[in-house]
Amino acid sequence: MQIETLSDASLLVIVGKKAGGGDDATAQQVRALADAMRAHPLIGVHDIVPSYRSIGVHYDPLIAGSQEYVRTWLNNLESNRSGGEHRAREIVIPVCYGGPHGPDLADVAKHTKLSPQEIITLHSNARYIVRAVGFVPGFAYLAGLPEQLATPRKAAPRTRVPAGSVAIAGLQTGVYPLETPGGWQIIGRTSLQMFQPNRNPASLLQMGDHVRFQPMEARP
């Protein structure tokens, strides 16, 4: 574990190798350390932001104390943390693929030279892991997309992407939790609420979760 200064009120905790990262083991280590921070909080730390191989720790120096004090808290968490692996949750997301729910499915088929059904089968048979949550609240970046489905982002992003849209870009897939602009290729939609401000945690998907998609028939 390495700790770097981000600002006079934030630190960056790097888990695993500084270069690279983004593997499943690192994701689980990040999740476990972030869980330890939340389970043994330091007064004055107001935001913990896990990502691919790092965790941003944001604090109020007037409450939490000096940067060295925060560093000591982090080092103690790491040294006292159980060596057991985090047991990942598996979240199943029902998806209506294609048609009005997946307007870019035909474009993805054209790019990949696969049929729409082949795309649906490959996408729903894969198993994914949450590597980061960001962009907008509750948007989880999911690794594990089959290489055959890799498709670039749209040249011209949409100004409005419906909430629940299931999309791919490059070698990642994800679900838009809110109506927002976006340039990923939309292949389906889910009725699950990916982000609810009054839910704890507000984001349905958390760093390190395992995810799979289940094809569903659209209701009339």
Image (cartoon, helix red, strand yellow):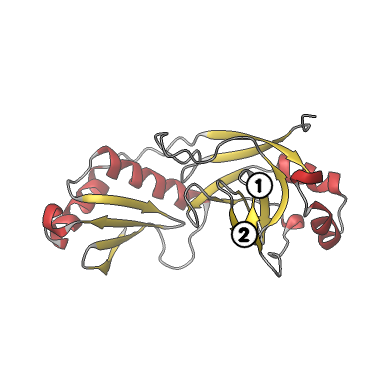
- Above or below: residue 40 compared with residue 173: above
Mark 1 vs mark 2: which is more N-terminal? 1
* Disc 1 crowd, CA 10 A, few/some/many (<14, 14-19, 20+): many
Residue 40: which quarter of the image? Answer: top left
Mark 1 in CB contact with mark 2 (< 8 angstroms): yes
Name the secondary structure under disc 2.
Answer: strand
Residue toward you, 167 or 193: 193
Question: Up-down: is 211 above or below 147?
Answer: above
* In the depicted structure, whether residue 218 falls above or below residue 13: above
**Visible residue check, residue 172:** no
Q: Nearer the viewer, residue 81 or 105?
A: 105
Q: Which residue lies most toward the top here? A: 219
Query: Circle 1 — which element?
Result: strand
- Name which residue type carries label 1: Ser
At x 77%, y 33%, the residue is 218
Q: Residues within 10 Å of mark 2 (few under 14, many from 20)?
A: some
Q: For this rendering, which residue is in front, 8 or 20?
A: 8
Q: Residue at x 47, y 41 (%)?
A: 203
Q: How far is the residue under mark 1 from the one under mark 2? A: 10 Å
Q: Is the N terminus in the top left, top right, bottom left or bottom right quadrant?
A: bottom left
Q: Which residue is mark 1?
A: 165
For this view, does 193 lie left or right of residue 28?
right
Could you tell me which quadrant the C terminus lies in? top right
Residue 182 badge: 2
Q: Residue at x 50, y 41 (%)?
A: 195
Amino acid type indicated by mark 2: Gly
Q: Is residue 99 left or right of residue 32?
A: right
Q: Residue 107 appears at what percent x and percent y?
A: 82, 59
